[in-house]
Amino acid sequence: MNGHRQRGVALITAILIVAIATIAATAMVSSGNIAIHRSATLQDSEKGWWYAEGVEQWVMTILERDREANEVDSLDEPWAQPVDYLPVDEGVLRGRVVDLQGRFNLNNLGTADTAAFERYRNHFERLFRFVEAGDNFQARAIAAGIRDWIDPDQEPTGFDGAEDNEYLGLEQPYRAANQPMASVSELLLVKGVTPDIYRALAPYVAALPIINSAINVNTAPEPVLLTLAEDAGPELQGFLEAREDQPAQDLASVQTLFPATSPPIDIQSRYFRLESEALIGSSRVGLYSLIFRPGPSGALLLGRSTDAD
């Protein structure tokens, strides 16, 4: 009887050892597969990053050559054509270049010139209503809040303004930046700006590292262009419809479309944003690049971010 019991114990022990060995082997294989996939993903991410940087350099070269060839920036030029599908080794690239000087520069509201501020505020209010972000009272209050966010003092702009005393009383307190916005996303920190308002405005505004910038009427999105004037007459509508094939070649030809009280306009641009995406294997790399083209030659990279505005 003892012999049978001992043999039974030995059999159970052997089965247990085999089971443990099988589990260990399975875990090792699984761990090895995970490590292989992780290495492959990291390798794909690295490739995607290098491809995205290559696109960045390519676009900067295109912008340099464009300025060497002409002094007008418009939507019919090579840099303005989006790339939806560009096959590369083990993946695909896509992207587009946005003329940021075709958008409303939020930092213009930080100007110290009272007359200029009135022009920019009126344009902002018209744009605000055009994109259905809210009513005129909201627009005026938010314009004042943006000005206070940017200007260096602690004096609120009228009843609607907001300086540190407004933000320090919040549940999660913070201070006004008191400097030009570095990103459009800073709008979400300004008094009165809700996520819905931000989503309505975001495609039409920019945060350029300058104040008192002009808007390129050849590239401005429809809401930005039509709200430059108090009343968008048939001539401005006609220019909007024709500009893709017949952009303005000199400033004087379009200056009459806008009253003297409108913000400054231009037909040249210096600030662009590249929005590129590299899909390599199972990896995705998104790169946003701020490019500055200062003059007749050269282009500078001012900053970049991944998957963010």
Image (cartoon, rainbow, N blue to C red):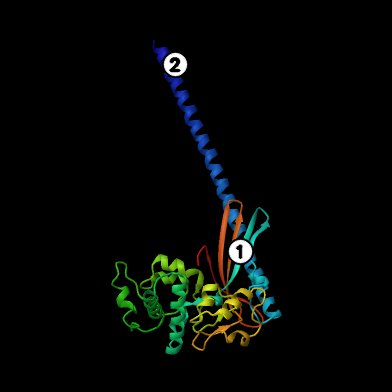
Name the residue nearer the viewer: 101 or 131: 131
Q: Where residue 117 appears, x then y in whole percent?
A: 44, 85
Residue that badge 2 annotates: 7
**Farthest front residue?**
234
Q: Where residue 61 appears, x then y in whole percent?
A: 67, 73
Give the mark, 2 or 1, whose residue is nearer the N terminus: 2
Q: Is residue 71 above or below residue 86?
A: below
Q: Where residue 305 appears, x then y in whole percent?
A: 52, 67
Q: Is residue 113 visible?
A: no
- Left or right of 268? Residue 156 is left
The label nearer to you, 2 versus 1, is: 1
Q: Residues within 10 Å of mark 1 (few under 14, many from 20)?
A: many
Which residue sits at x=54%, y=44%? 34
Mark number for residue 112?
none
Which residue sits at x=46%, y=87%? 116
Q: Is residue 152 above or below residue 169?
A: below
Query: What secondary structure is found at the residue carrying circle 1?
Result: strand
Name the residue nearer the viewer: 116 or 259: 259
- Left or right of 50? Residue 131 is left
Amino acid beneath label 1 = Gly
Name the residue nearer the viewer: 138 or 268: 138
Find the distance from the CA under tag 2 to the CA under tag 1: 71 Å
Amino acid beneath label 2 = Arg
Which residue sits at x=40%, y=71%? 134
Residue that badge 1 annotates: 95
Name the residue nearer the viewer: 100 or 237: 237
